[in-house]
Amino acid sequence: MASKADLQVAAIARLRDYCDYKNEGVVSQHYMGQMQFMKEHLGQMSEPIMELKKLTYSDARDAFLKSLKDKTVTDASKAEFLDLLTKFMPRGLVLDVRSDMLLGEMDSLVKRLAAAEPISLLAEEKKKKDRDETVDKSITFLYNKLHFDDYANEYLHSTDKSTVSIDAVLLKARQSVANYCCVLRIPMNDNDTLSPFMLSSVEALVAANERLIEKIREIEQAFKTE
């Protein structure tokens, strides 16, 4: 199994390439266009991020359960653990954990945490229905914040539906991602550490970009069938 450090390097490297929207030589030489480049890089970011979430959760869970056993848990450490769960887990599980804590159902809490697995935002985004409500809201928020609907509409109303037009729109999307990463100060160096907040933020970026790509594809397919 890859270490946390190796997984972080892999995720950050792909994100750094993704944000390097001015280096168009890479895309033109090795990919069939922006869409292929983006799809491959989104997948290459998603995999190490999910593994990092699993390892981060496992470490936090073990530390929290140990503090419960040793009776050293504090309100601050409990709040910190719940905050991580909110970022990594389905909404229903977080509510169940809060209920177990409130009612003092320790056996139920231990079993629930042992069986829990972080939710994949990309997998949720690919669902056609029954998405996790909290996840969907976080992806929609970022999709709107990055003005992705404007880019989709730009392509929708363009008279040119060629790959060149798609590339122009998706290149703007990559620029928006790069600007957002600067504003949020997402780490871009190989020796940086991705906090739970940063992990969930990057994963939401991946899912929001996936949503834009699928919308562009839908518009392209609809145009072809007219």
Image (cartoon, rainbow, N blue to C red):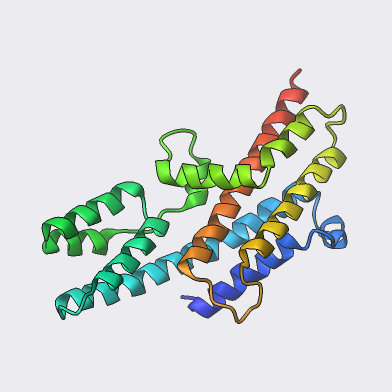
Q: How many marks?
A: 0
| Residue 94 relative to residue 38: left or right | left
Q: Nearer the viewer, residue 126 or 156?
A: 156
Quadrant housing residue 63: bottom left
Question: What is the x, y in percent for residue 139?
Answer: 53, 46
Identified at 74% across, 39% down, the residue is: 151
Which part of the image, by quadrant, shows the C terminus? top right
| Residue farthest to the front, as pictured | 75
| Residue 102 relative to residue 46: left or right | left
Q: Is residue 212 above or below residue 71?
A: above
Question: What is the x, y in percent for residue 70?
Answer: 16, 81
The answer, for residue 132, to whether it is visible in the render is no
Quadrant housing residue 192: bottom right
| Residue 203 relative to residue 97: left or right | right
Q: Nearer the viewer, residue 98 or 30?
A: 98
The answer, for residue 33, to whether it is visible in the render is yes
Identified at 60% across, 75% down, the residue is: 9
Q: Is residue 156 above or below residue 139?
A: above
Question: What is the x, y in percent for residue 214?
Answer: 64, 38
| Residue 214 relative to residue 63: left or right | right
Identified at 88% across, 61% down, the residue is: 25
Question: What is the x, y in percent for residue 156?
Answer: 76, 29
